[in-house]
Amino acid sequence: MQQIIYDFFHNIPLMSALISTIIAQIIKLVINIIVYKKLDLYLIVATGGMPSSHTACVGALWMSIVLIHGLISTECAIASVLAGIVYRDAVGVRRQAGIHASILNNLTMRENDENDPTPQLLKPLKTLLGHTPTQALVGLAEGIVVGLIVTLFVFS
């Protein structure tokens, strides 16, 4: 068991991805404090916003794999495809789902009207799901930088 734990924490690409994800989530928290002057700890686990922690994660994973195994490795090919899918999902499908949720919220939510006996049964849908292309690119760049630092300096 001790060897499994040791191996887990010495898997450089995995640690790069995890560290980059944590840093991206902390950056979201800091941006919220600076812009809105408010501490919202939910942002540590929230999706959406600047920067994308999903693209940061795959960017760090990709960079570590490139540095360890090279650009022509099978591992790099797998990480590249994964990064492309995650980026496309962040700016495409998840972003559109958030826009749809916003529209549905506007259609289904109404002010409490004491003359309307129909109870309001629906909770608002979460609208901050995806990212703008800029948010996803900043996350990807942050991940690549973190992957570079972790691979070359932290675990070298």
Image (cartoon, rainbow, N blue to C red):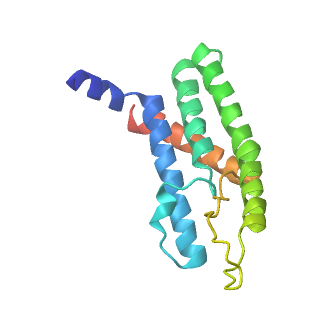
- Find residue 144 and report its horizontal and vertical position in percent: 59, 40
Where residue 16 sits in the image (x, y, percent)? 47, 37
Q: Name the residue: 50% across, 38% down.
A: 17
Q: Closer to the camera, 107 or 17?
A: 107
Left or right: residue 15 versus residue 50 is left
Q: Is residue 38 left or right of residue 12?
A: right
Q: Nearer the viewer, residue 100 or 146?
A: 100
| Of the pair 82 and 154, the residue shown nearer to us | 82
Q: Position of residue 33 (x, y in %)?
A: 53, 73
Q: Is residue 73 above or below residue 143?
A: above
Q: In the image as oriented, which residue stretches furthest toward the front? A: 117
Q: Quadrant of residue 153?
A: top left
Q: Residue at x 59, y 30 (%)?
A: 62
Left or right: 10 in relation to 38: left
Q: Which of the pair 47/79 is nearer the observer? A: 47
Q: For the point 74% across and 43% down, which residue is it?
A: 93
Q: How many marks?
A: 0
Which quadrant is the C terminus positioned in? top left
Which image quarter holds the N terminus? top left
Residue pushed farthest left? 2
Q: Position of residue 108 (x, y in %)?
A: 74, 65
